[in-house]
Image: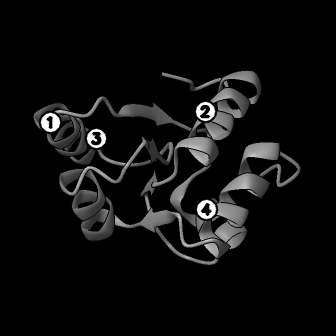
């Protein structure tokens, strides 16, 4: 686990700013209310959950990016203080920068 990744730090800042929805129910609500800008999946999340979230994202008029990171659910728990396999970033500025950093630093990028 590498907690020096910049996108992890930015996810923590987004969480403290109230711009991060964590967990299945909160992420799904964020997508349906068209607040989500990006959906982030842990590396060990089930394919069924990924499909469910992608279907939900595809069903709204707003374009929502979905991406997988290399951190596991347990690592996200250690780094962000909440055990979740799916997160949504609900702010355009945070999501743009987080996406850029994930693409730079992550081998799992989607």
Residue 27: x percent and y percent?
32, 60
Displayed quadrant of residue 80: bottom right
The residue positioned farthest toward the right in the image shown: 4
Q: Quadrant of residue 33?
A: bottom left
Horizontal and vertical percent position of residue 10 = 73, 53
Reading the chain from its start, which is encountered first: label 3 or label 4?
3
| Residue depicted at x 66% and y 23% | 103
Disc 3 packing (10 Å; few <14; some 14–19; many ≥20): many
Between 34 and 73, the one lying in front of the other is 34
Q: Which residue position is annotated with label 1?
A: 55
Q: Residue, x 65% and y 40% (percent of image)? A: 98
Select label 4 or label 2 by which is in front. 2
The residue singled out by tag 4 in the image is 76
Circle 3 residue: 50
Q: Left of 32 or right of it: where is 79?
A: right
Alpha-carbon span between mark 1 and mark 4: 23 Å
Q: Nearer the viewer, mark 2 or mark 3?
A: 2
- Mark 4: few, some, or many residues within 10 Å (few <14, many ≥20)? many
Percent across and percent down for residue 8 are 73, 52
Q: Mark 1 or mark 4: which is in front?
A: 1
Q: Tell me the residue at 64%/62% (across/down).
A: 14
Q: Which mark is residue 99?
A: 2
Whether residues under marks 1 and 4 lie with C-beta atoms below 8 angstroms apart, the answer is no
């Amino acid at each position: 686990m590498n907690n020096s990744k910049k996108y992890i730090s930015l996810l923590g800042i987004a969480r403290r700013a109230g711009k991060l929805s964590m967990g299945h129910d909160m992420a799904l609500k964020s997508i349906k209310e068209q607040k989500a800008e990006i959906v982030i999946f842990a590396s060990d999340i089930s394919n069924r959950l990924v499909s469910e979230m992608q279907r939900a994202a595809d069903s709204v008029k707003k374009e929502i990016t979905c991406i997988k990171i290399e951190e596991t659910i347990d690592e996200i728990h250690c780094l962000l203080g909440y055990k979740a396999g799916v997160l949504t970033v609900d702010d355009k500025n945070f999501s743009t920068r987080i996406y850029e950093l994930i693409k730079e630093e992550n081998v799992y990028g989607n």
